[in-house]
Image (cartoon, grey):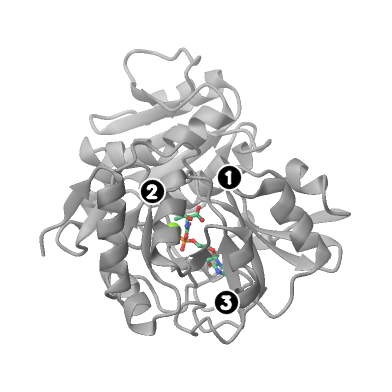
Amino acid sequence: METKVLKPTKKNVKYCAKLIKDGEVVGMPTETVYGLAANAFDEKAVNKIFEAKMRPADNPLIVHIADISMLKELTTSIPDIALAVCEKFWPGPVTIVLPKSDKIPLVTSGGLDTVGIRLPSNNVARELIKECGFPLAAPSANLSGSPSPTTAEHVYDDLNGRIPAILDDGSCSVGVESTVISFENDIIRLLRPGKISVDDLKTVASNVIIDRGVLEVISNDAKVKSPGMKYKHYSPKADVTLVSGSVEFFEKYVSERNSENTYALIFDNDNISDDIKSIRYGGNSIQQAERIFSVLREIDKIGAEKVYARCPSKEGVGLAVYNRMLRAAGFKVVKEGD
Ligand code: TXA
Ligand code: MG
């Protein structure tokens, strides 16, 4: 199968909607990362998503809607706190987990009785959903385990020949996947950090609990609240280590281990020895979120074997960057003073 990369003109959006209506899967831009979209109600089509990206069947998909009116038929109950989140942060990068209705097949929800739902702010995504007339199940459009795609080219690199088309709307503005949350009375449980931060969520909830899967290793046979957290994720082929502490400690630590295929991931304003090959990944958390997945793909392209990364801040969207980096590093963190 030839994979077409298409500009998001009205005609091409219609063409992709037709493919999806015919049971195909299509690469779709969103403000967070590119998604691999199919009819959320169609078991066969959803199975094609799992096949194309070689995803484990128990990892549930997010269902994307174009308008809040599409929410009702997907769930059996919408607590007030969920509505408050939708009103405040939709359209935008937050996914809410609610009890699923019978319209959502179990393949879509990874066998769970809940469903993750999101109203993206990207116009092309919303046009595509509207044109289809049904919600679109869409995981990130990468091969399972590899860094999420933030450009159409990333999607093409992973899925060329496996899907019929990708709508190319340029680089994703946020760069990390949506914040995933569930609800326990008035409390929000953070299952995956994203651009909508803990502080943002605290403006609508009495409390926000950070699920232990956000910052801890979850074994593959563990029963967890968000199955995606237990899989090896975002992992480049290179061996990545996070180094926490001052830039002086970082420079010394890497210098002592430097070799031909060693690279450092540093912040924009860091100054380290020219003897260490380095890649900059942003000066603040927002820029780091935007660049992290491109940088993780780049280090594979240049054949890096060992990578040492400056540890990102955990504030705001920084928690999302840290969470992704931690997984890219297989949870290897070196701390100054340890
Ligand atoms: O920003 C995003 O969320 C992107 C774009 C394409 O929308 N999508 C995305 O999907 O990142 P995916 O499949 O790569 O990640 C979905 C995450 C997984 O960690 C999954 O376990 C969790 O959301 N999730 C989905 N449905 C869930 C549910 N019912 N209960 C708990 N976690 C759920
Ligand atoms: Mg993913």
Identify the element where label 1 is drawn: helix
Tell me which corner region of the image, top left, top right, bottom left or bottom right, holds residue 229: bottom right
Residue, x 74% and y 42% (percent of image)? 200
Q: Disc 1 residue type?
A: Ala
Q: Residue 228: give x, y in percent of width and height.
A: 51, 66
Cβ–Cβ under 8 Å for marks 1 and 3 = no
| Residue position marked by numbered label 3 in the rendering | 222
Q: Nearer the viewer, residue 303 or 131?
A: 131
| Residue position marked by numbered label 2 in the rendering | 29
Q: Residue 179: give x, y in percent of width and height.
A: 61, 52
Q: How many marks?
A: 3
Residue, x 21% and y 63% (percent of image)? 163
Q: Residue furthest right?
A: 206
Q: In the image, 291: left or right of 5?
A: right
Q: Nearer the viewer, residue 254 or 266?
A: 266
Q: Disc 3 residue type?
A: Ala
Q: Nearer the viewer, residue 196 or 89?
A: 89
Pick whichever of labels 1 and 3 is earlier in the sequence. Answer: 3
Identify the element where label 2 is drawn: loop
Q: Nearer the viewer, residue 118 or 20?
A: 20
Q: Residue 4: give x, y in percent of width and height.
A: 16, 53
Q: Quadrant of the C terminus?
A: top right
Q: Ligand 1 near label 1 (Cβ, under 8 Å)?
A: no
Q: Nearer the viewer, mark 3 or mark 2?
A: 2
Q: Residue furthest left?
A: 2
Q: Residues within 10 Å of mark 1 (few under 14, many from 20)?
A: many
Label 1 vs label 3: CA separation?
A: 22 Å
| Residue position marked by numbered label 1 in the rendering | 320
Q: Residues within 10 Å of mark 2 (few under 14, many from 20)?
A: many
Residue, x 17% and y 56% (percent of image)? 160
